[in-house]
Image: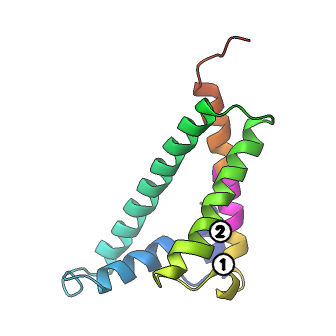
């Protein structure tokens, strides 16, 4: 919701998942067959799938690696690391979007905020679902 609000506020021209899906389709054999609605759906599906996979990875790591600090700190830190690896790493490396440092001025602050919020919620939900550890 935060990303949609940022787009509506004019902070970004398009949501990154939709832009990435569009580039994936353009590079594929399906470029002529996929219209704007299919590309948008693919963007949402890929984004939620990636979020679910990284959320599951976070839950496994959080359960296996005890560290000090609360769930909001852990979740937000993890989600911001995912943002950094993605928007400063593999996404520009395969030319889906420019590096965060060269992107639209409003998009990356909105994306950082969205990732931090996602991580905070993820941290709390995972913490509630973890089995109780005995001292």
Residue 79 lies, with reference to residue 122, above or below; the image says below
Residue 95 locus on image (x, y percent): 47, 85
Residue 114 lies, with reference to residue 109, above or below; the image says above
**Disc assigned to residue 125:** none
Q: Mark 1 touching mark 2, by CB under 8 A?
A: yes
In magenta, the rendered stretch is 111-118
Query: Magenta stretch containing residue 117, yes or no?
Result: yes
Q: Which residue is mark 1?
A: 107
Residue 23 locus on image (x, y percent): 38, 83
Of 47 and 82, the residue lying toward us: 82
Of 127 and 12, the residue lying toward us: 127
**Disc assigned to residue 111:** 2
The quadrant where residue 89 appears: bottom right
Q: Is residue 30 rendered to the left or right of residue 59?
A: left
Residue 75 locus on image (x, y percent): 68, 45
Is disc 1 placed on a helix, strand or loop?
helix
Of 3 and 58, the residue lying toward us: 58
């Amino acid at each position: 919701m935060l990303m949609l609000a940022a787009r509506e506020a004019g902070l970004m021209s398009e949501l990154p998942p939709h832009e990435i899906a569009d580039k994936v389709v353009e590079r594929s054999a399906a470029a002529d067959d996929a219209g704007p609605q299919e590309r948008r759906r693919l963007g949402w599906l890929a984004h939620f799938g990636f979020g679910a996979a990284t959320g599951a990875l976070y839950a496994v790591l959080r359960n296996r690696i005890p560290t000090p600090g609360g769930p909001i700190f852990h979740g937000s830190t993890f989600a911001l690391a995912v943002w950094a690896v993605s928007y400063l790493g593999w996404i520009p490396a395969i030319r889906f979007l420019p590096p965060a440092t060269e992107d639209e001025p409003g998009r990356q602050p909105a994306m950082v905020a969205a990732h931090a919020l996602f991580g905070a919620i993820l941290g709390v939900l995972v913490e509630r679902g973890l089995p109780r550890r005995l001292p």
